Amino acid sequence: MFYGDCPGDDTDETLFRNAEPVDVDGQIIYVQTLEFYYENTEPNNEYYKMVEQWLKNKQVSLPN
Protein backbone atom coordinates (compact mmCIF):
# COMPACT_ATOMS: atom_id res chain seq x y z
CA MET A 1 0.00 0.00 0.00
CA PHE A 2 0.85 3.65 -0.07
CA TYR A 3 0.70 4.42 3.65
CA GLY A 4 3.14 7.13 4.62
CA ASP A 5 4.41 7.71 1.08
CA CYS A 6 2.47 10.86 0.27
CA PRO A 7 -0.15 13.07 1.92
CA GLY A 8 -3.74 11.98 1.39
CA ASP A 9 -2.76 8.54 0.13
CA ASP A 10 -5.26 6.76 2.36
CA THR A 11 -8.29 8.73 1.14
CA ASP A 12 -11.14 6.94 -0.62
CA GLU A 13 -10.40 8.93 -3.77
CA THR A 14 -6.86 7.53 -3.92
CA LEU A 15 -7.57 4.02 -2.70
CA PHE A 16 -10.49 3.42 -5.06
CA ARG A 17 -9.34 5.37 -8.12
CA ASN A 18 -9.01 2.21 -10.26
CA ALA A 19 -12.10 0.48 -8.89
CA GLU A 20 -15.82 0.55 -9.51
CA PRO A 21 -18.52 0.17 -6.84
CA VAL A 22 -20.48 -3.08 -7.18
CA ASP A 23 -23.60 -4.01 -5.17
CA VAL A 24 -23.36 -7.57 -3.85
CA ASP A 25 -26.35 -8.59 -1.74
CA GLY A 26 -26.89 -4.99 -0.64
CA GLN A 27 -23.23 -4.49 0.26
CA ILE A 28 -21.18 -2.06 -1.84
CA ILE A 29 -17.69 -3.37 -2.56
CA TYR A 30 -15.05 -1.90 -4.84
CA VAL A 31 -13.74 -4.05 -7.66
CA GLN A 32 -10.67 -3.38 -9.77
CA THR A 33 -11.61 -2.27 -13.28
CA LEU A 34 -10.81 -4.61 -16.15
CA GLU A 35 -9.01 -1.80 -17.95
CA PHE A 36 -6.70 -1.29 -14.96
CA TYR A 37 -6.11 -5.04 -14.71
CA TYR A 38 -5.32 -5.29 -18.43
CA GLU A 39 -2.85 -2.41 -18.31
CA ASN A 40 -1.03 -3.72 -15.22
CA THR A 41 -0.86 -7.49 -15.56
CA GLU A 42 1.61 -9.65 -17.42
CA PRO A 43 0.49 -10.90 -20.87
CA ASN A 44 1.18 -14.49 -19.81
CA ASN A 45 -1.26 -14.24 -16.88
CA GLU A 46 -4.03 -16.84 -17.12
CA TYR A 47 -6.81 -14.21 -17.32
CA TYR A 48 -5.08 -11.72 -19.64
CA LYS A 49 -6.49 -13.10 -22.91
CA MET A 50 -9.97 -13.45 -21.43
CA VAL A 51 -9.98 -9.82 -20.26
CA GLU A 52 -8.49 -8.66 -23.56
CA GLN A 53 -11.24 -10.42 -25.52
CA TRP A 54 -13.96 -9.00 -23.24
CA LEU A 55 -12.65 -5.46 -23.66
CA LYS A 56 -12.39 -5.86 -27.44
CA ASN A 57 -15.98 -7.15 -27.59
CA LYS A 58 -17.09 -4.10 -25.59
CA GLN A 59 -15.08 -1.94 -28.02
CA VAL A 60 -12.93 -0.42 -25.30
CA SER A 61 -9.81 1.35 -26.54
CA LEU A 62 -6.89 -0.84 -25.46
CA PRO A 63 -3.40 0.55 -24.81
CA ASN A 64 -0.64 -0.46 -27.22
Image (tube, helix red, strand yellow):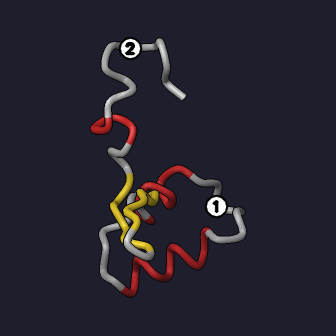
Q: Is residue 47 above or below residue 45?
A: below
Under mark 2, the amino acid is: Cys
Whether residue 18 is visible to the viewer of this picture, yes or no, is: yes
Name the element at disc 2: loop
Q: Amino acid at mark 1?
A: Pro
Whether the residues at callouts 1 and 2 have beta carbons within 8 Å, the answer is no
Q: Quadrant of residue 57?
A: bottom left
Q: Residue 46: name its quadrant.
A: bottom right
Check the image and report above or below for 7 versus 62.
above
Mark 1 element type: loop
According to the picture, the residue beneath numbered tag 1 turns out to be 43
- Looking at the rendered image, the quarter that the C terminus falls into is bottom left
Q: Looking at the rendered structure, which numbered label has been put on residue 6?
A: 2
Horizontal side, residue 37 vs residue 13: left or right: right
- Say above or below: 29 vs 26: above
Give how far across and how far down residue 33 sits, in percent.
41, 61
At horizontal 31% and vertical 73% (from top left) the residue drawn is 60
Q: Residue at x 32, y 38 (%)?
A: 12
Question: Number of marks in the image?
Answer: 2
Marks 1 and 2, the one that precedes in the sequence: 2
Residue 35, numbered label: none
58 vs 15: above or below: below
The location of residue 55, given as percent across then percent down, is 41, 76
On the image, the x and y values in percent for residue 7 come to 33, 13
Residue 64 in view here: no
Marks 1 and 2, how far apart in space?
A: 30 Å
